[in-house]
Amino acid sequence: MASIQAHNLYKVFGRRPARGVEALKRGFTREDLRHEGLTPAVIDASFEVEPGEIFVVMGLSGSGKSTLIRMVNGLLEPTSGSVAIDGMNVTKSSGEALRSIRREKVSMVFQHFALLPHRTVGENAAYALEIQGVNRAEREKRAAEALAMVDLDGWGGSLPGELSGGMRQRVGLARALAAGTDILLMDEAFSALDPLIRRGMQDQLVELQDRFDKTILFITHDLNEAMRLGDRIAMMRDGRIEQIGTADQILNDPVNNYVAQFVQDVDRSRVLTAESLMEKPIAVIGQDQGPLAAQKIMRENQMSALLSLRPDRTLRGVALESAVAASVASRRADLPLLGPAETAVVRPDDLLNELFGIAATTEGPLVVVDDRDRVLGVIPRVTLFAAASTQEIDLDDSPNGLAPSTVGGSL
């Protein structure tokens, strides 16, 4: 079951907002309703957030993203539609039932820290636990542990005014972690920070997510931040969700011109990963086969590089066309290979900007392996460089003359 479920959400501000929803369903535009004194903030928004996922809602100012997150935690009531958290209907909950969901299921991290200035850092980190009725000794212990998680060990006795902006935001994150909820709602949590501090907070969030596997709904207007953090991203415009997908899907398969124009200036090298670029090899060769067999496979498949795999699908090495041809001419019986130590081996989550330097160390394609060193796929050089450019590449001029079909296809 999804941790967060939002179905057909509408939020219209003004008198008689239900009439506004009906008008939107009949095809009236946002501007049409504004002439009638109604402001549609969110229009027919539906999405689900899976357990352990970072789901980013991305949009410019006025797109409706902050209104959306306020409907998720029950701070705003939808004009129409529903929200459920862990199967519990937030929309129909009120009073103690709604407060219970907020206390036990959801923690918020705000843009402007929302710290109590006359309470210490430790007391701020423990505040959600105090609301939950946790005894003092336990909440102090959990708050201290949470502060240590965000590198604020020893700062518990300080006041928020004695901390930098980045440190105060880490207190807000510690407060959410100390609460022990499985779901974090982060509304423009890093937007008020300087770029370098913001980058550090992004790094820290990724590290914490690797450790604790929270479900995170993250709101931002920064596309690079969305691409860096999100397992999936919802692109919003004028109250509507235009597209939901991974960073790779949104970059490479935008649903419309708006999304395409929005992402055209994204630094793709910091978003695309080896997994998103890799191709399955057309063919491989076993460890007992020699240069004649390799040459036959390479000619039949028009390949200039061939992987040799062991029976357990780990890499034995890469055979290059030129070396194989020389071996056949000299009647050598053994297959000449670039061994694993000489071959560019990468992991699925390695970023594109990390792959260029690695590719420079070997003649063959990059080989993508899993955590058990089994081969998942390959990245030909032309694919690597084409991924970083929107311009067409002349395959005849590509490094080593490796065309995309050189080692592509299926196992």
Image (spheres, rainbow, N blue to C red):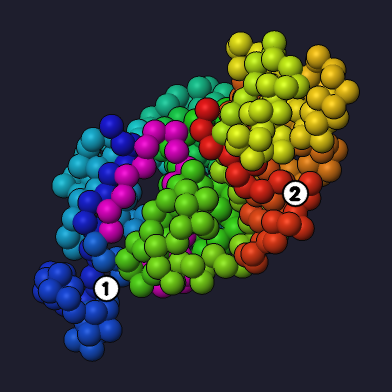
382 relative to 254 in the view: left or right: right
For the point 22% across and 51% down, the residue is: 7
Element under disc 1: strand
> Relative to residue 155, is residue 265 drawn left or right?
left
**Among numbered discs 2 and 1, the one appearing first in the sequence:** 1
Residue at 42% across / 26% down in the picture? 134
Can the viewer see residue 404 in this picture? Answer: yes
Three-letter amino acid code at the position of disc 2? Gly
Q: Position of residue 366 (x, y in %)?
A: 71, 36
> How many C-alpha atoms fall within 10 Å of the one at disc 1: few (<14), some, or many (≥20)?
many
Q: Which residue is mark 1?
A: 40
Residue 148 in view here: no
Q: Position of residue 281 (x, y in %)?
A: 59, 33
Q: Which residues are magenta?
A: 45-67
Residue 280 within the segment the image draws in magenta: no
Task: Provide residue 39's location: percent of width, then percent of height.
Answer: 27, 77
Residue ID for mark 2: 401
Q: Nearer the viewer, residue 349 or 384?
A: 384
Q: Is residue 50 magenta?
A: yes
Q: Which residue is rendered at x = 33% and y = 37% of the image?
A: 3
Q: Amino acid at mark 1?
A: Pro
Give the vertical position of 177 relative to 313 (above or below): below
For residue 282, above or below residue 380 = above
